[in-house]
Image (tube, helix red, strand yellow):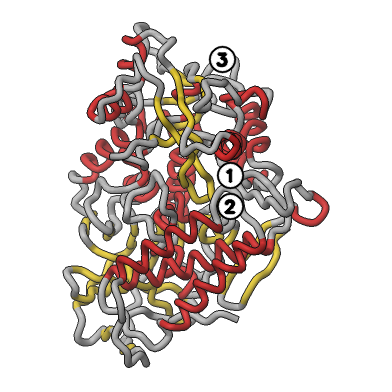
Amino acid sequence: MVEFKRYCVDFDTKSDDVLKFDVVIVGTGVAGLYTTINLDRSLKIALITKESIQISNTTLAQGGIAAPLSQDDSPDIHYMDTIKAGAGLCDTHMVRILVDEAIENINILLKMNIPFDLDDEGEIVLGQEGAHSRRRIVHASGDATGRIISEHLGLKLKSYNNVTVFENTFLVDILTDDDKAIGVVLKRKDKNLIIFARYIVLASGGYGYLYKYTTNPEVTTGDGCAAALRCGTKLVDMELVQFHPTVLYHEKNKSFLISEAVRGEGGILYNINNERFMPMYHPQAELAPRDIVSRSIYFEMKRTNSHNVFLDITHLNSQFIKKRFPNIYKTCLELGLDITKERIPVAPAQHYSMGGVLADEFGKTTVENLFVCGEAAGTRVHGANRLASNSLLEGLVFGKRIAEYINGSNIGEVKEVNVLYNCKEVKEFEGDVMVDIEILRSKMNEFAGIVRNKEGLECLISYILDKLYSLTKVKLQTIKQIEYYNMLMIGYTIASAALMRKESRGSHYREDFPYQDDVNWKKHLVFSLNGWEVLE
């Protein structure tokens, strides 16, 4: 049984800086910001962000928010699309909540004057994306929905005198007492900061930066999930990692997302031999679910011995392209690529983490007073393959639910206890942590990527366990060293769950078990400090 450190740094509540708040929220993507805005204004809130308030996966989200707003759509149809994409692993209760409360939350954003794209009659323009049977994607500034929402929510929070924002502040660990979360240990300018709080909300994002090729920013090293695991929570569905089919493949940029909506508006995929290939893999062709399109591109690249395929929208009206995808058009043009005239070189890259900290319909974890929301949460709402544009929606719906639960609770006094923690470690960290991180990311991409097998996963697990063991007696002193430790912890859970799941389902594909097995594997794998268990 693998053992992890309980706390990653030495700290002392008597000598370190200590603050008290009613609620601590870690993360400033849509989940963190929207939860904060929906909390009662009488609560004293600390909002923690690893870098600046605008650096998150939310700001990179291009597509939009899925919501059944059109006359030919309904929550029931949205529900069925989500269930189908999830390949049998969606929690039906959670999906029902997601789709039933979608319109309500879109209306709240409209009342906040979020500038969604409108047509000439002032009606919301709805986009089409893969695996959606209706046009239901609400977007802003064409392909900059996440950034627009994040900026507007961030500006709104500036007027809230009950909210204190801590930028460039790193979550190290979650303090517990009698199996209850009571605070957080943070690093700020290489100094410890301890905040005691009645409630803690993790909205810290996913763990995409574990992979060499990802659309995620460098901050997504799984810190929230790792800290939650160390304090006693459970992680679920960690093997279910989504790879976006179309990420720019350019010598100067291999992480820029080419939105799902590009295919939704008519984009066509070609291999290097100028052959359209998606109809050979799936009847929905370019609009098949993400996992299918990603694997199809992977196999096509392997078949043609190439590093990329091409996405073509040159047949669309050039003015439409510039208006609908201004950010994509501008970014590609800066790299010398005019997408109105040239095909876009693309390849799959890690994009989203379906797994996370096990949570119920109010974001509650298995540790009392600790909540989780957004990509850090394991709500099982996305099943084995997230439906496009359901991620921002999840952050909105469950962020509001967490806020309402806290608002309806008796906050009471913030408990403050004296804690002195001295690590038993005696060794200094050896080597270059940046090199270690890049080696791990390459191995994750190679062995726990789009296509997996027993031999590769066992090799990866052995490597990670060796590294974890070597750090047992090592004192972690820098943020990068703690990030690396977090990445090893999360990498272990991903690889181990992927090895255990002897089937292929949604985003998880085992070439040695290439078929979906509903008899034995229509269930969720859950990991905690006590080991593995199965959730039906």
User: In the drawing, does residue 194 fall left or right of residue 211?
Assistant: left
Compared to 85, does 483 lie above or below?
Answer: below
Real-space Cα distance between discs 1 and 3?
Answer: 25 Å
Where does label 1 land, which residue?
382
Let me know if residue 126 appears in the view: yes
Chain-order first, disc 1 or disc 3: 3
Sort mark 2 into few (<14), some (14-19) or many (20+) by Cα contacts within 10 Å: many
Compared to 26, does 159 lie above or below?
Answer: above
Query: 435 or 36: nearer the eye?
Result: 435
Of the two numbered discs 1 and 3 in the rendering, the one whose residue sits closer to the viewer: 1
Real-space Cα distance between discs 2 and 1?
Answer: 10 Å
Q: How many marks?
A: 3
x and y percent of residue 382 in the render?
Answer: 58, 44
> Marks 1 and 2: in contact by CB < 8 Å?
yes
Label of residue 71 in the image: 3
Q: Residue at (36%, 11%) from the top-left corner? A: 320
x and y percent of residue 418 in the render?
Answer: 31, 87
Where does label 2 land, which residue?
240
For mark 1, give the secondary structure: loop
Q: Residue at (16%, 69%) from the top-left corner? A: 189
Q: Residue at (23%, 72%) from the top-left corner? A: 19
Sort mark 3 into few (<14), some (14-19) or many (20+) by Cα contacts within 10 Å: few
User: In the drawing, does residue 444 fall left or right of residue 277?
Assistant: left
Chain-order first, disc 2 or disc 1: 2
